[in-house]
Structure formats: structure tokens, C-alpha cells
């Protein structure tokens, strides 16, 4: 049998959970025991982390970033695209993480970028917003994920993005830069990139820009010797704990 104090605690806790569910159904999100905020305001609040690290964004770019979370929240209700925990930290874990590439390397107007294994559009979509004069091809072998990317592209009117369902091995075009976010082991990924770069062995020209976390040394050792390599900790640019032991790896 529960004590009176435990009964009161249970009732309060149940009320909080019920209120949370109720307000979320009204497009209002629960923040803590006393604070509820509309979903649009919640997304705007969280998107400010992008402005923190990229203060020179245009109004158009910032508006596009702010629209990302509602678009992915809607798609997430239809297909299991992003975990609930990651969705709660969407701008930090997905958008800002993708933009670490922008901190490391400037994608110039006219460059062609291939995003292999883009999933729901990362890192390609955030980078395409950041570099509107750069051309992006986003590919993934899973059709439902590419459907999401195509919808996001249309909703944000990203004229510099093309998204197709295709295996990386079947892409025959040449690119200045190939990006990806930990889709496989680096040595295997390098094989997918064979003959897809316009220029190799030139750090300024581009190459492979790969987002990877954890112990990367063994993977780097197993990359073929003809590839030069450089790894940079993302904590060089971002102070959040999430980015500890996460890197931008440059192969060229």
C-alpha cells in the first residue's frame, strides 16, 4: 500500500505527464513542470544555437534553419527518421553537427558536392542552406529517406539541391567535395568515393569531408596510403559537451 505522501506524488506526476501529452496535441510543448511554450517558439529558441556560431547568416538563411525542425517533426510522426531524444536536441545534434564542415572548409560558389548516405538530409541540407551558390547532390539507397529530403528541399525552395535514391557506387559524376556523416567505416567509405573526385592530393581543392566520432585512429590507419589525411576536433569551434570526441576528417 502507498503512503499518503507517495499517493500525492503519483497524482502530481500523472497530472504533469497528462498535461504534457494534452498540450503537445495542441502544438504546445512541455519544457518543465511550470513552463509550456508553443512549438514554433520552441523551435525558434533552439535554432538560436545556429546564430550563436554563425552570426552573419542572412534573414533568409536563418528562416530556412528555423523551418527545419517543424518539417522533420512532421516527417518523424510518419516514419521513424530521428530518435525522440535527438529530435529534442535537433539543432545541436543534427544541424550544428553538420555545419562543423562549414567551420572547417568553405564550399565555394560553383563547387559540386556529393553527400553519400544522406539519410534524412544530413549533412547536405544544412550545408546547402549555408552555401546557396554551391551545388549539392544528396544520395541514399533508402527511398523513404530520399522522399523526406525531396520534400524538405521543396518546402525550403533549395534550388541548389538534388536528391536521388541511388547507391554511391553507381554515381558516375565528378565532384569537388564528398561529404558524409559516419555512414560506415572510413576504409569502406573511401572505396565508394573512388574516381568521384575532380582533384586529389590538394587540400585546398576539396576531397572527402567526413563527420566521425569516437576513436578514429585505427580507421585512419586503415585508409589506403595514397590518401593524405587531417582530423580536427569539433570542440575547436563548439563548446557543447555533445561534440567531445567528434571530428571533421579531411581525406585528399
Image (spheres, helix red, strand yellow):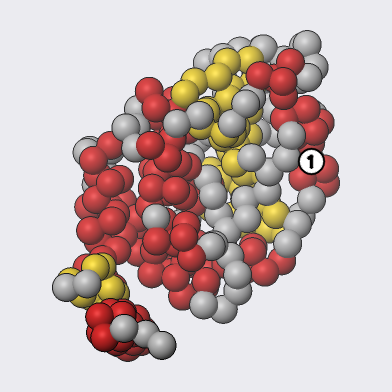
- List x then y, in percent, for residue 88: 39, 61
- Residue occupying the point 28% across, 46% down: 49
- Residue occupying the point 67% across, 69% down: 144
- List x then y, in percent, for residue 13: 31, 79
Q: Tell me if I can see residue 223 in this picture.
A: yes
- Residue occupying the point 73% across, 40% down: 184
- Residue occupying the point 66% across, 19% down: 217
| Quadrant location, the N terminus | bottom left
Q: How dense is the environment of label 1, judged by Cα within 10 Å: few (below 14), some, or many (20 and up)?
A: few
Count every numbered label the image shows and give the total: 1
Q: 70 and 212: which one is in front?
A: 212
Q: 56 and 2: which one is in front?
A: 2
Q: Tell me if I can see residue 23 in this picture.
A: no
Secondary element at tag 1 = loop
Vertical placement of 171 versus 78: above or below?
A: above
- List x then y, in percent, for residue 163: 62, 57
In the rendered image, which quarter is residue 97 located in? top left
Left or right? Give the position of 176 relative to 100.
right
Left or right? Give the position of 135 relative to 189.
left
The residue indicated by pointer 1 is 172
| Quadrant location, the C terminus | top right
As drawn, which residue projects farthest toward the left? 34
- List x then y, in percent, for residue 6: 31, 80
Vertical placement of 179 versus 208: above or below?
A: below
In the rendered image, which quarter is residue 239 located in? top left
Amino acid at each position: 500500500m502507498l503512503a499518503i505522501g507517495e499517493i500525492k506524488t503519483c497524482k502530481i506526476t500523472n497530472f504533469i505527464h497528462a498535461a504534457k501529452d494534452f498540450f503537445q496535441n495542441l502544438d504546445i510543448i512541455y519544457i518543465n513542470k511550470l513552463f509550456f511554450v508553443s512549438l514554433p517558439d520552441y523551435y525558434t529558441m533552439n535554432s538560436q544555437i545556429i546564430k550563436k556560431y554563425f552570426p552573419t547568416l542572412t534573414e533568409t538563411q536563418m528562416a530556412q534553419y528555423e523551418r527545419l525542425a517543424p518539417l522533420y517533426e512532421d516527417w518523424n510522426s510518419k516514419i521513424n527518421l530521428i530518435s525522440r531524444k535527438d529530435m529534442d536536441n535537433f539543432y545541436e545534434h543534427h544541424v550544428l553537427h553538420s555545419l562543423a564542415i562549414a567551420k572547417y572548409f568553405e564550399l565555394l560558389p560553383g563547387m559540386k558536392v556529393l553527400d553519400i548516405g544522406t539519410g534524412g538530409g544530413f549533412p547536405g541540407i544544412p550545408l546547402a542552406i549555408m552555401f546557396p551558390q554551391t551545388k549539392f547532390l544528396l544520395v541514399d539507397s533508402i527511398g523513404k529517406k530520399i522522399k523526406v529530403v525531396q520534400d524538405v528541399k521543396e518546402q525550403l525552395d533549395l534550388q541548389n539541391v538534388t536528391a536521388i535514391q541511388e547507391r554511391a557506387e553507381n554515381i558516375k559524376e565528378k565532384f569537388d567535395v564528398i561529404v558524409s556523416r559516419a555512414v560506415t567505416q572510413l576504409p569502406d567509405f573511401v572505396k565508394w568515393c573512388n574516381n568521384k573526385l575532380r582533384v586529389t592530393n590538394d587540400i585546398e581543392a576539396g576531397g572527402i569531408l567526413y563527420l566521425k566520432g569516437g576513436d578514429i585512429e585505427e580507421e585512419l590507419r586503415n585508409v589506403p596510403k595514397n590518401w593524405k589525411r587531417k582530423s580536427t576536433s569539433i570542440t575547436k569551434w563548439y563548446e557543447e559537451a555533445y561534440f567531445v570526441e567528434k571530428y571533421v576528417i579531411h581525406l585528399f
